[in-house]
Image (cartoon, rainbow, N blue to C red):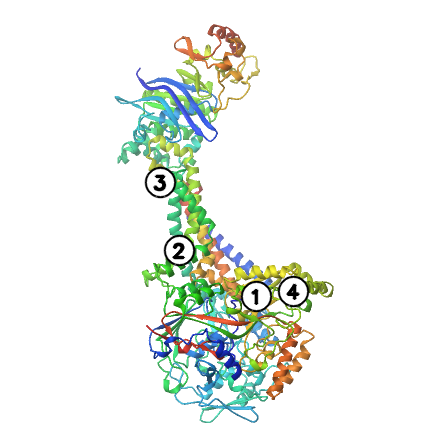
Amino acid sequence: MLNFIVRRIIFAIITLLAVSAVVFAIFSLLPFDPAALTCGQRCTDQIIEGNRIKLGFDKPIYIQYWLFLTGIFLGRSYGEGAAAFTCPAPSFGYSFNENECVTSLLTEALPVTVNLALGALIIWLVAGVSLGVIAARFRGRWADTTSSVFVLLGTSLPTFVTGLALLIWVTIKWKLVPLSVIGYTPFLENPVKFLQFFILPWITLAIAYAALYTRFTRAAVLEILGEDYIRTARAKGVKERAVLLKHTMRAVFAPIITLAGLDFAGLIGGAIITETIFNLPGLGRLTLRSVTEFDLSIVLATTLLAASVVIIMNLIIDMLYAVLDPRVRV
Amino acid sequence: MSNISALRRAVVVTAAGALALSTVMVAGATSASAAVTPRAGGILTFLEHTPRLDHYDPSRIYTGRDLAFMNSFMTRTLVAYNPVPGAAGANLVPDLATNTGVPSNSAKTWKFTLRPGSTFEDGVKVTCESVQYGVSRVFATDVITDGPGYLQAWLDIPKDAEGNSVFKGPYKKDAAGLAAFKKAVSCSKDNRTITFQLNKSVADFNYLATYGVISPVQASKDTGDKYDLRPQSTGPYKIEENSKTQMKLVRNTKWSKASDPVRTPYPDEVVILFGYDEEVIDQIILGDTIPTAVSFGEPLSTNNDKFFSEASMKNRRMNNPDPYARYFAFNVKAMPCLEIRQAMYYSRNAKALLDYAGGPTYAGSYATGVISPLLAIDYTPTKVVGPGSADFIPEGNIPKAKALMEVAKTKCPADYKKATETGIKIDVRQSVALNDTIPIDTAAYARAGIKVTFNPISSGYYPTVMNPEKQSDLSASGWGADWANASTVIPELFASYGGFNISQNLGDPAQKAFEDKVNIAMKTTDRAAQSKMWKALDAEAMKAFWVLPTIFGKAQFVWGSQVAGVFFWVPQGNPAFGKMWINN
Amino acid sequence: MSQILTVNDLHVAFPTDDGLVRAVDGVSLTLSQGETIAIVGESGSGKTVTGLSVMGLHKKGATQISGSVLLKDGDRTVDIVTASDEEIRQLRGRAVAMIFQDPMSSLHPYYRIGNQLAEGYLVHNPGQKKQAHARAIEMLDLVGIAEPAQRADEYPHQFSGGMRQRVMIAMALMNSPRVLIADEPTTALDVTVQAQILILLKSIQKEFNMGILLITHDLGVVAQVADKVSVMYAGRVIEQGAADDVFYTPKAPYTLGLLKSVPRISTHGSARLKAIPGQPPSMINLPTGCAFAPRCEYTSDALGDICATDRPALLGTDSMHLSRCHVAEPTRDRLFVKELKEVRS
C-alpha cells in the first residue's frame, strides 16, 4: 500500500510538471504579446520593450519556464526603484490588473471555493444519495415519482436561475437569511456568519448536483439490487433494511465516491456561476475575471491549480478505492 | 448597449446648458429630506456589480463615477467642483489651494497656493513637494497606466526624438529628466505654492486641477503599482479595507473640517460592496432590504418601469440626461475597411436597442456624433449620422448596408471575408442585459450579412479595451467632455495624443488631415470660431466612421429609504456622493 | 422419512406490460428428509421460480402467488405463500437455505468470506459473534477448504470458482437447515469440479440429513444424485417420478427429447446428439392445448387434434410415475422403447 502511494505521488508530481509545461507552452503560443499586455493605453514601444526586459519576456521560453518554476520555490521580484517589490515564495507571478501577487490572490480565493464546494458536496451527497436510495427502494411508487420530478427540475434548471431565485426570494423578499453584507468570514472566526454566507450558495450548487446524484444512486442501487450477491444476502435471511443499507450501499459507494471526487475537483476549478451570483470571492470568479482581462499570470496559476486539484483528487480517489474495493488492492 | 457603465468623465455645461438641464431635471430628486438638517452617523453602503473599481490610485482613475466617488471621500485636489445641486455645481471652488488657480503669461503659467492645515491620513502635512511628486508619477507610464494624459501633453518638458517626454517618472534614477520636470512643475521656497509651466496657452487648465492626476502623494508611501490598492487619503475618509468583496472607508481622524471648505462628511463609514448581481441589487433597492444602500450603477433597464412607477420609490430615484455620448469605438487597425464600418452602422437596429433600454424616457436619444447636446455651444447635429442625416433609419437602413457590403466585397475582400465568415468581435461590459441585447444585435447585423461575436468583460473594462493588444474589433464605450469645451472630446477621442483614442485610427488615411485641423482648433482662442471648428470636426469624424455612435444617454439612480441628501451633481454626471447622509 | 417440504398446486405469475407471465402453473411436490428431488427443465421452464418460491424470495407486490408451500420448521409448519415477510425472513437461511448457479457473482465482492458466512449465523442468532466466526471456520473446513481460519479473512476474488461454490455451500450450512435448494450448483463450474461439488453435496446431505431440491437442466447431474425427478416444461410439471423410472422409462415425449439431447460418447465411437426441434413457447401466450404440442412428434398418435385443444392432466398407471400426455400410455411405452434403444445403444 505504501509503495502504491509513493508511486502515485511521484506520478502526480511528474504529471503536474508536464501540465505546467504544457500550459506554459500554450500561453506562450497565444497570439498576444505578454509585454504589451502589461502596458497601459499610452503604450509606446519603449515601454513595451522596457517591460519585456523587466519581466523576463525577452528570454527564451524554456528560461521563462525555469524562472516560473524557480519563482515557485524562491519568489520573484518586480519593478524598480521606489516601485520595486517582491512576491515571496511560493510565487506564481504578479497581476498588474489586481495589483497583487498571484499567490496572495489564490490564497484569498481558495478557502472560499473549497468551503463552497465542500459544503455543497456534503449536502448533495446526503440529499442526493438518500433520495436516490428512497427512489430505488420505492421504485414506481409516489416517492420515486416525486424524486424524479426533483431530478428533472434540478437537472434542467440552470444554477443561475435557482441561485438568483433563492437569493431574491429567501434573502431579499422573505428575509429568512440575512444578506451577507460582510462577505466571507472563516468558520472559526464566526460560525453563524460563515453559515449565513454559504447556506444559499451551498443549496444552489447542491440542488443541481443532488439531482444528478439522485438519478445516479437510484440507477446504481437498482442495478446492485439485481446482483446475485444481494439475492444471497436475502437467502441468508438478512433484513431488507440491511440488504439495502449494508450490502447494496457498500457496493454503490465506490462509484459515488469516484464521481463525488471528480465533481469536487471540478468545482474547485470554477463554480463560476454560483460564485458570481452570490458574490463569493472565490477561484471561479478570479479565473473568469482574469480571462476577460487577459491576466495571463492568474489564468496560468488557476489553470495549474485546477489541474493539481484534479490530479490530487484522482490520487485520493484511487487510494479510497483501494480501501473500499478489495479487488483493486495491491 | 443600454447598461454599459460608460467611461464617465465629468462634463461642465455652459450656463445655457445648465439652465436647460435644470428644466429637464424634474424627475430628479432633490429629495424632500433637503429640508431636514443632515445628521452624522450610519454606514452608507454602495452596491456595485463589478468585483472592484478599475482604479483607486488618483493618478490612474479616469472613470467619471469613480473619480466623483474618490474625490468626494478620499482624494483632495487643488480645486474642486462645488458639490451643490443645479448649475452652481459646475462652479470651481478652492480645495487644497486657497484659490482656483492664477494664470499668467497668456495662461501658459498657472500658480496654486496651498492652504495650511491639510494633511495625509498619517498626519504628514500636504506640501507643494507632495503635489509635485504626485504629478511626477503620471510620467512613469510603464507603471502608472490609464488616467488622463493632459499633463504629459501640456507640461513644458522637452520631448525626445520619438515625441515622448524626456522625464520618465520618479521610479527611474535620471537626474536630467527630473530636473526638466522640476522646471515645469516647481515649488516655492515656503513649499506652499506650486507653479505649472505649460508649453501652450490653456485657459481652462484649472479644470484639470479637479482631477487626481494633480493631487498630493507622499514619496515615502508610494508603492508604485501597488499604490492602486491602497492610496493614502487626504480627505475625510480613509481606506480601512479594500478586498475582493468590499471597500470600507472609515473616518480619517487627521482630516480637519477647517482645512477643507468643500467636504462635509456625514456617515461614520462608507462601504462599497462589490460583485452583487445587477438583478439582486435592483431587488435590494426595490425591497428596501438595505435602507442605507445606494445602487452604485444604473438599474437594469428592464426594471426601470418598476422603479419609476412604484409610489414608495418616489424619493428614492432620479432620471437625468447624462453628459455622455455612447458609441462603439472601431478598432480601425483591425477593421480598416470604411464600407464595412459604415455597413455596421446602417445595419444596426438602433430603435430596438433604444426601446429595450427604455426608449427616450430612460435611455436617451439617437446620437448625431460624439459631442453631446449638453455641451451646448459646441453641439449641432452632424447630419452625417443619426436624426437629420439622409440615410438614418432607426430600425436600420438595410438596402444601404447591403450596398456598402457589396462595395466592400471587391474593395476589401479580406475584411469582407472576416465580416461575413469569421465574424466581427465586439467588446462589451458584462451585464445580464447582454442576454437580451446580443440577440438583437446579432439579428440586426445579420440582415446585412455581417456576423458578430461578443466578448463580455467582467471587470477592468476600460483598462482592457484601452490596451491595443487586448482590444477586439469594436468596443462599447462612452465619453463626456472633461469640461465645457469640445477640446476635451474631439482630440481626446481621435487625435494621436488623445487620452481616450481607442479607435486605433492613426493608420487611417483621413486621420492626418483631421489631426491638423484639430491642432488649429486647439490653438484658436476665439471661442465662437473654435466651436464652429468642433462642430465641423464632429461631422468629419463621423464621416470617417472611427466610431459607431449610438445614443446621447440618460442615467437613472436609485437608493434606499434611509439615504438622504441625494442630488445630481451636474459636472460629474453622477450623484454628489459626499453629500449623502443616513436619515434613520 | 418425514416430509419437510410440501408444495401444493403452486402458481406463480408476474404481471408485465405485455401481459401476465405464468411462470409456474400448478406445481406440486413433496420432499422428505435425506431425499433429493431434482427439478429438470430448459431455462424459462419455471424451475428456478419454483425454488425461489420456496425461499419466499418473490416480491409480494410484483408477483401473484397461489397454492401452498408448506415448510416444516421444527414442530410447526409454515405456509410460505401466506406467511408474513418477517416470518419468511426468519426461516430463510435457517430452515431452508439456497445455493446459486454462479458462485462468482453470488458472493459479495467487498466483504471477507468469514464475515459473509458469519452474517448468516448472526442474522438468526443475534449477538453471538464469536460462535458465528467459529461456525464459519468449521463449515469452511467441512466443505473442504484448506486452512479455513486464514481463508476466512480473504475476499471472494481470492478464491477459485469451485472454492467459491464450496463457500456458498458452507454458507448454506451455517444454520443446519433441513431443506437445501441448489439452483444449478454446478453449471458454472469445470467438469472435474462439478463432480467434486456433487460429491460434497451428497456427503453433507447425509451428515445434516437434509432434503435437497436440486434445480438443474443437466440430466447427468440428476442421474448422479436425485432420488426423484420432476420434469418441468412451460411452468408445469410434465413428468414426475423416481429418478430411475424417469430415466429408464420416460413417459412424456419432452422427457424423451431431453434424454435424446444429452451428449454421450457412444460405444461406436460417434457422438449422437438430437436436439428437440423448435423453441419453448412464450410464457405470456401459451398454446391452448398441450404446451409442448408445437414441438411434439407424437401428436398424430393422440386422438384427433386434442393436443392442440386440451391440456393434458398429470396422470399415470403407476401413481408414483406421472406424466402429461394425450397419447395413451401403452402407445407411448411402445413408441419410446424403440427410441430409447437407439439412444442407449
Which x, y percent locates residue A262? 46, 51
Residue type pointed to by label 3: Leu
Q: To which chain does the residue with label 3 belong?
A: A
Label 3: element kind:
helix
Q: Are marks 4 and 2 on the same chain?
A: no
Q: Are marks 3 and 4 on the same chain?
A: no
Q: Which numbered disc, 3 or 2, marks the residue closer to the eye?
A: 2
Disc tally is 4
Q: Nearer the viewer, residue B4 or B136?
A: B4
Q: Mark 3 to mark 2: distance in Å?
A: 26 Å
Residue carrying label 2: A202
Q: Mark 1 to mark 2: distance in Å?
A: 33 Å
Residue carrying label 4: B397
Residue carrying label 3: A245
Location of the N terminus of chain C (image quadrant): top left
Q: Which numbered disc, 1 or 2, marks the residue closer to the eye?
A: 1
Which x, y percent locates residue B533? 64, 82
Mark 3 and mark 2 lie on one chain; the one further toward the N terminus is 2
Q: Mark 3 to mark 1: distance in Å?
A: 55 Å
Q: Which numbered disc, 3 or 4, marks the residue closer to the eye?
A: 4
Residue type pointed to by label 4: Asn
Q: Mark 4 to mark 2: distance in Å?
A: 50 Å
Residue density around tag 1, few if under 14, some if 14–19, many if 20 or more, within 10 Å: many
